[in-house]
């Protein structure tokens, strides 16, 4: 069978784009391999990221790797699409002529046609799952209407466009029919969902209707925006047993000075929302993302950020150092005058604080029992997650295979009950409850 190597870089939203594209390839008689160096695939398609400098560099390096493979005759055709290609198509064509064609983020039909296939409209919503079969991402919108000063996504993806609810429910049912048990809800901003087509924030209704799909056991919410957070979503998380007590909500900073430069509201809104979430959903796990080194972050602002992390004790936390992106408000308005080493030192300091917090929180879980989903079996361990952890980025639960009879060995996607017996900084150790 003819084969295409489809390589996806960047975020989970790119994964969804690639999966939709792969359904078209498969329907046209091709076998698709994901993120593979298999040189038996003579056609390579790369879905690029252009969000920050390090992501751009990874995209360019990957393109050049396959340019060299093409030069050596291992592959015949090389196509590039996605965020980097959307933003820098002209420059890329001039710099890397070995690539057969570049496409933007909305040109999936053109990719299919360029390879000589027929785009099948009947497949809208169909996807070939590239993640483990038991979980999948559901992208509920495209673009973003927020005005965060440092972010290039609106320049790349355009204005916010919600996917119709009936279309999302149909896609989720298709995923469930393929064996998906956990849906991870994603968008540039999930809490804005519905305003453009339903004239109101409609995320809570979508979550409720998704929870009615029988095969879906867990629904996990990512990339929420803190300002004007919908209260009905809080109630849905609190009261719906299928909605994980988990929320990924990037706050970026806590200093009002920096938040003003970022164009992201005020810290009073942040403190109020955190209190509201933890009051109404006492066992919620909060994940946030922070940004160090944005223009205006002096020593006092950074100290305020550190104290915020220490006092709030987020369950999960990631941090990036500021990367100036051309065309953004920050790039045009502010001088990027904080040295890179200072940005990185601050990011590392935040993660050192979070390491200690994570260790404390994990220690407190020892002796407790949790329902977990099995992700995989690896090196004599069953690797699983609680509802408080998202795949790839959060903690895992390790269970020794030796502690389980072979006849009762679980499989990926199974739910089992586990008692935590020990903890590490970012992982838990457990045994199956009999």
Image (spheres, grey):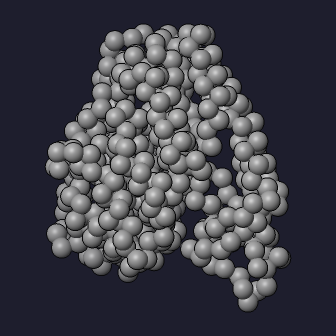
User: In screen coordinates, is 118 left or right of 47?
Assistant: left
Q: Position of residue 334 (x, y in %)?
A: 39, 11
Using the image as rendered, state which of residue 269 and residue 146 is in the foreground. 269
Left or right for 259, reference 369: left
Q: Is residue 289 above or below residue 390?
A: above
Kindly identify the residue that appears in the image at 74 percent across and 53 percent down: 365
In this rendered view, identify the residue nearer to me: 91 or 232.
232
Q: Nearer the viewer, residue 29 or 205?
A: 205
Farthest bottom residue in view: 407
Q: Quadrant of residue 84?
A: top left
Q: Relative to 257, does residue 33 appear above or below in the rendering?
A: below
Q: How many marks?
A: 0
* Residue 417 x/y as whole percent: 68, 71
> Picture coordinates of residue 140 (x, y %)?
31, 54
Q: Position of residue 401 (x, y in %)?
A: 78, 75
- For the point 82% across and 76% down, which residue is it? 403
């Amino acid at each position: 069978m003819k084969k295409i190597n489809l390589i996806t870089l960047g975020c989970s939203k790119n994964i969804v784009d690639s999966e939709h594209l792969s359904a078209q390839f498969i329907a046209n008689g091709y076998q698709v391999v994901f993120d593979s160096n298999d040189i038996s695939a003579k056609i390579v398609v790369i879905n690029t990221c252009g969000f920050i400098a390090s992501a751009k560099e990874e995209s360019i390096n990957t393109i050049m790797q396959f340019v060299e493979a093409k030069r050596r005759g291992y592959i015949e055709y090389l196509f590039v699409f996605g965020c980097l290609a959307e933003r820098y198509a002209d420059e890329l064509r001039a710099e890397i002529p070995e690539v057969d064609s570049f496409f933007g983020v909305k040109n999936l039909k053109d990719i299919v046609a360029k390879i000589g296939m027929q785009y099948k409209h009947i497949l809208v919503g169909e996807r070939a799952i590239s993640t483990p079969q038991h979980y999948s991402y559901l992208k509920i919108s495209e673009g973003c209407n927020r005005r965060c000063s440092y972010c290039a996504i609106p320049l790349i993806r355009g204005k916010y466009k919600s996917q119709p609810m009936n279309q999302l429910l149909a896609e989720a049912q298709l995923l469930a029919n393929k064996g998906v048990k956990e849906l991870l809800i994603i968008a540039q901003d999930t809490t804005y969902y519905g305003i453009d087509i339903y004239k109101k924030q409609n995320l809570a209704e979508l979550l409720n209707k998704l929870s009615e799909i029988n095969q879906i056991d867990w629904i996990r919410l990512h990339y929420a925006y803190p300002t004007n957070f919908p209260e009905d979503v809080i109630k849905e998380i609190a009261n719906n047993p299928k909605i994980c007590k988990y929320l990924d909500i990037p706050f970026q900073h806590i200093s009002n000075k920096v938040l003003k430069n970022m164009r992201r509201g005020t810290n009073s809104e942040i403190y109020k929302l955190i209190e509201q979430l933890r009051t109404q959903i006492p066992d919620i796990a909060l994940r946030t993302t922070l940004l160090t080194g944005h223009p205006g972050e002096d020593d006092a602002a950074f100290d305020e950020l550190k104290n915020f992390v220490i006092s709030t004790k987020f369950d999960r936390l990631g941090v990036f150092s500021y990367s100036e992106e051309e065309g953004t408000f920050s790039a045009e308005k502010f001088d990027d005058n904080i040295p890179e080493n200072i940005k990185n030192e601050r990011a590392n300091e935040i993660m050192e604080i979070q390491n200690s917090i994570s260790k404390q929180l994990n220690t407190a879980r020892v002796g407790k029992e949790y329902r977990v989903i099995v992700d995989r079996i690896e090196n004599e361990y069953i690797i699983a997650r609680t509802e408080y952890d998202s795949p790839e980025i959060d903690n895992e639960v390790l269970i020794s295979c030796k502690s389980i009879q072979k006849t009762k060995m679980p499989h990926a996607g199974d739910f089992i009950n586990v008692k935590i017996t020990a903890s590490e900084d970012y992982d838990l150790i457990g045994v199956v409850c009999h």
